[in-house]
C-alpha cells in the first residue's frame, strides 16, 4: 500500500489544507500511477486561487498480521 498526502500552501507558505489517497495497486519501482486525493482538512472558504503551492508525500505502508 502507498499512502499519498498532499499539503496545500497559501501565498505566505503556510499550510491551508491536506488531501490524501491510498493506492493499493501494484506499483513497481520506477513506475508512476495517477491518483485522486480527497480532503482530510479543507476549510469551507478555501478556493483554488488561495492555493499557491503544494507538496506531495508518497510513502509505503506494510501491515503484518
Image (cartoon, rainbow, N blue to C red):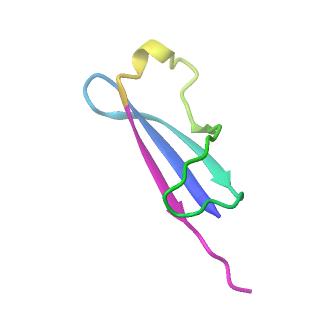
How many numbered discs, if any? 0
Quarter residue 3 falls in: bottom right
Vertical position of residue 52 compared to residue 56: above or below: above
Q: Where is residue 15 drawn, in percent x and y?
A: 37, 36
Q: Where is residue 37 drawn, in percent x and y?
A: 62, 39
Q: What range is drawn magenta here?
A: 54-65
Outermost residue on the right side: it is 65
Taking the magenta stretch, the answer to whether it contains residue 36 is: no
Q: Is residue 23 left or right of residue 7?
A: right
Quarter residue 42 falls in: top right
Q: Quadrant of the N terminus?
A: bottom right
Q: Quadrant of the C terminus?
A: bottom right
Q: Is residue 17 left or right of residue 28?
A: left
Q: Residue at x 66, y 54 (%)?
A: 23
Q: Residue at x 48, y 42 (%)?
A: 6
Vertical position of residue 19 compared to residue 45: above or below: below
Vertical position of residue 50 compared to residue 34: above or below: above
Q: Is residue 13 left or right of residue 16?
A: left
Which sits in the foreground, 30 or 61?
A: 30
Vertical position of residue 63 compared to residue 49: above or below: below
Outermost residue on the left side: it is 12
Q: Where is residue 26 drawn, in percent x and y?
A: 68, 61
Q: Residue at x 31, y 34 (%)?
A: 14
Taking the magenta stretch, the answer to whether it contains residue 56 is: yes
Q: Residue at x 27, y 32 (%)?
A: 13
Amino acid at each position: 500500500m502507498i499512502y499519498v498526502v498532499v499539503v496545500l500552501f497559501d501565498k505566505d507558505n503556510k499550510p491551508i489544507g491536506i488531501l490524501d489517497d491510498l493506492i493499493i495497486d501494484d506499483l513497481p519501482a520506477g513506475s508512476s500511477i495517477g491518483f485522486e486525493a480527497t480532503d482530510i482538512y479543507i476549510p469551507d472558504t478555501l478556493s483554488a486561487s488561495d492555493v499557491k503551492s503544494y507538496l506531495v508525500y508518497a510513502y509505503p505502508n506494510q501491515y503484518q498480521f
